[in-house]
Image: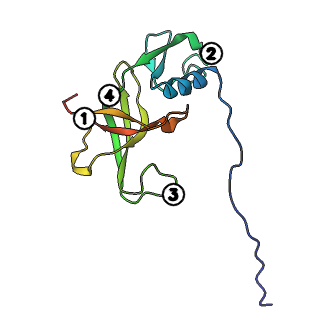
Amino acid sequence: MSDVLSAPHIMEFPYTRSTGPVVGAFLTGLRDKKLLAYRADDGSVVCPPPEYDAKTVAPVDAAALVEVGPEGVVTSWSWNPVPRAGNPFDRPFAWALVRLDGADTSMLHALDAPRDAIETGMRVKVRWADETVGFINDVACFEPAGGAA
C-alpha cells in the first residue's frame, strides 16, 4: 500500500479574551498614556496589575491601582536576532523585563536598542504608539532613557 493519508490542519486560537475590572483599568490607562499598577496589602507594587493577588488569591480591588512612572530599569533581557511574524519589529531587538519607577515587579516588553548598548540595570523609557487604543501595544516598546540605574 503506497497511499499516504493526510489532512490539512491549521492550529489557531480563535477566541477573544475579555478583561476584568483591573486589567481593563490597566488597558484604559495605557490608552491615556498612564501606567497603572496594584498596591498589595503588604505595600508591594505590581505592574502590570493582576485580577487576583498572587499571595492571598483574593480579587484585586481596582481602587488599589496606583500610577507608576514611564521610565524604569532593565532587570533582565534576551536578544532576539531573528524576529518572527507578530513580533513588534521586523529587525533584531531585545525582549526585556523592566521594573518601572515606583513598581516592585518587572513587566516584559520589547526593547528597541542596539545589542551592544543593552545591559542589565540600564534606564529605559516607554515609547508610546502613535495612536493609543487601550491595548498592550499602546506601549510600542521601551527605549534607552540615558543615565544609570
Q: Which numbered circle lies on residue 58?
A: 2
Dot placed on the residue nearer the N-terminal end, 2 or 4: 2
Q: Determine which residue is flagged by label 4.
A: 72
Residue 4 found in image quarter: bottom right
Q: Quadrant of the N terminus?
A: bottom right
CA distance separating discs 3 and 4? 28 Å
- Disc 3 marks which amino acid? Ala
Q: Nearer the viewer, mark 1 or mark 2?
A: 1
Residue at the spot 77% in from the left edge and 72% down from the top edge: 7
Q: Position of residue 144 (x, y in %)?
A: 27, 37
CA distance separating discs 1 and 2? 34 Å
Badge 3 crowding class, 10 Å Cα cut-off, few under 14, some 14 to 19, many 20 or more, is: few
Residue at the spot 44% in from the left edge and 17% down from the top edge: 67
- Disc 2 marks which amino acid? Ala
State yes or no: discs 3 and 4 in contact (Cβ < 8 Å). Answer: no
Q: Look at the numbered disc 1 and give the secondary structure of its residue.
A: loop
Q: Which numbered circle lies on residue 122?
A: 1
Dot placed on the residue nearer the N-terminal end, 4 or 1: 4
Residue 90 found in image quarter: bottom left
Q: Is residue 99 above or below residue 76?
A: above
CA distance separating discs 4 and 1? 8 Å
CA distance separating discs 2 and 3? 37 Å
Q: Which numbered circle lies on residue 85?
A: 3
Q: Nearer the viewer, mark 1 or mark 3?
A: 3
- Disc 1 marks which amino acid? Met
Q: Quadrant of the C terminus?
A: top left
Q: Which residue occupies the foreground of this view, 86 or 58?
A: 86
